[in-house]
Image (cartoon, rainbow, N blue to C red):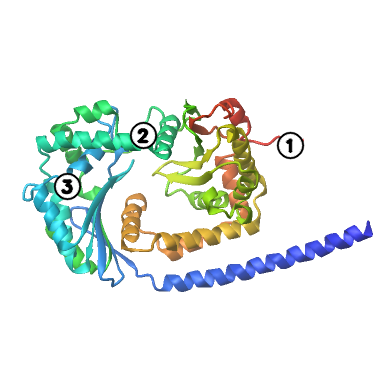
Amino acid sequence: MAFRLVKLATNLRSLSKGSNVIQRFKSTHSSDFKAALVNIPATECTSLDNGLRVCSEDSGAKTATVGVWIDAGSRYEDSSNNGVAHFLEHMAFKGTAKRSQTDLELEIENLGAHLNAYTSREQTVYYAKCLSKDVPKAVEILADIIQNSKLGESEIERERSVILREMQEVESNLQEVIFDHLHATAYQGTPLGQTILGPTKNINSIGKADLQNYVATHYKAARIVLAAAGGVNHNELVQLAQKEFGKLDNTFDGQVPTLDPCRFTGSEIRVRDDSLPLAHVAIAVEGCGWTNQDNVPLLVANVLIGSWDRAQGNGVNNASNLARASAESELCHSFQSFNTCYKDTALWGIYFVCDPMKCDQMLYNVQSEWMRLCTMATESEVERAKNSLKTNLLLMLDGTTPICEDIGRQLLCYNRRIPLHEMERRINSVTASNVRDVLMKYIYDRCPAVAAVGPVENLPEYNRIRSSMYWLRY
């Protein structure tokens, strides 16, 4: 017995020393992170008289990314016009009042630039990557696209088939299918439950009037951010914006578009298909919006779960408990945690791909890890997750395009760009107690949304999944 006590005391001393190692690593990592922040230029923002915001970060690079971020996406649609925002994005490069599609493509190609666009559930984005000296031309082209798209009938008809082919490609990507199903069941009966591309019947019926009405309703100056990063002079960018976007209307003929709350529903959708080789499963609870104070602790918790792929081959040495279990017991082929945020809600959960008869075992381990973090998350693992999150923030901003995207998105979500040093302080302030409290609030004993596709016979039925969202202690 005495030997055991001595051994226990020795172990406690070693753990105490280990905590000092963690603190030393923390201070080293923090100093390195602060040193990295010193070289990051400030973000400058200016509002034009019509309400359009111009924001840029000048790094002095030879290249630049400039784009238009619009506060409009599939969430602002209803069942009758779902898909119109994405359709409009496709029509943007099909010619304007002063440029044909051929002229537009040749002009961009002669500049050596790249023009692109995408639509999400809350935003529509048009952006160009070019040499810094060509920023004025890029801004002029983007302004022409936004304000003067021709929306010709023949181009609309041609683009229908393109979008329908794109829908077929999306349907062959099971990860995309799973997340569409997850939104459909989690936010059923609300705009967030709709797909971005829209249903086939809408694609076949959307016409010029629908597109023009969407532009007239949503493409207003106050809902638009002109963002730029790279070799960009802010004062010159403001002058360009005033010249090209200064006459953009900011008045609404009808009702001002507003976001209606999207109700989260704990529920499931299963598409059993035994012809598929692997089961694809996503399970999520309702998280919080971008501006909620709980968002950062949830981001830290998301890193604690982590991600893993069998091809990496390092699961047994991974810091994530779930990754180690997945590698040692061959629970799955891959998994990734996610925190898909919107303005007032979010989906916080995990997506995994596993063999047909491993669904039950994998889900058991996922929910057990969730419950462990709700009740027993430790300071050491939270410290690791915080360091990893801060590193990922810098890695995600490597290049002019990610920085430009970060500026545009944050201006629409927060009405400002959060400086990295402020984000660092927010992350550093998170403790294990914060993580446990926030997870107890959003995960513990909550009804999840579940989406599953493939050979999912082995996936437990919903009531059993729901009963595993808490632990009974005796």
Indicate left or right for 37 with 51 as reference.
Answer: right
Residue identifier under label 2:
171
Q: Foreground: 207 or 386?
A: 207
Q: Residue 320 placed where, x, y %? A: 60, 52
Residue 326 seen in the figure: yes
Whether residue 247 appears in this view of the structure is no
Please name the amino acid that badge 1 sits on: Arg
SS label for mark 1: loop
Q: What is the distance, in whole Å, between disc 1 and disc 2 at their CAs?
A: 44 Å
Which residue is most to the left?
Answer: 98
> Helix, strand, or loop for circle 2?
helix
* Residue topped by disc 1: 473
Looking at the image, is mark 1 or mark 2 earlier in the sequence?
Answer: 2
| Mark 2: few/some/many CA within 10 Å (<14, 14-19, 20+) | some
Q: Is residue 452 left or right of residue 216?
A: right
**Closest to the observer: 379 or 45?**
379
Amino acid, disc 2: Glu
Q: Which residue is drawn at 42% across and 48% down?
A: 290
Q: Nearer the viewer, mark 3 or mark 1?
A: 3
Using the numbered discs, state the Cα–Cα distance from disc 2 to disc 3 in whole angstroms.
Answer: 25 Å
Q: In this view, does 207 lie above or below 133?
A: above
> Residue 47 in the image: x percent, y percent?
23, 58
Identify the disc placed on residue 93: 3
What numbered label is drawn on residue 442?
none
Which structural element holds mark 3? Answer: loop
Residue 77: % across, % down: 28, 34
Please name the residue shown 21% across and 42% down the image. 90
Q: Position of residue 392 (x, y in %)?
A: 47, 59
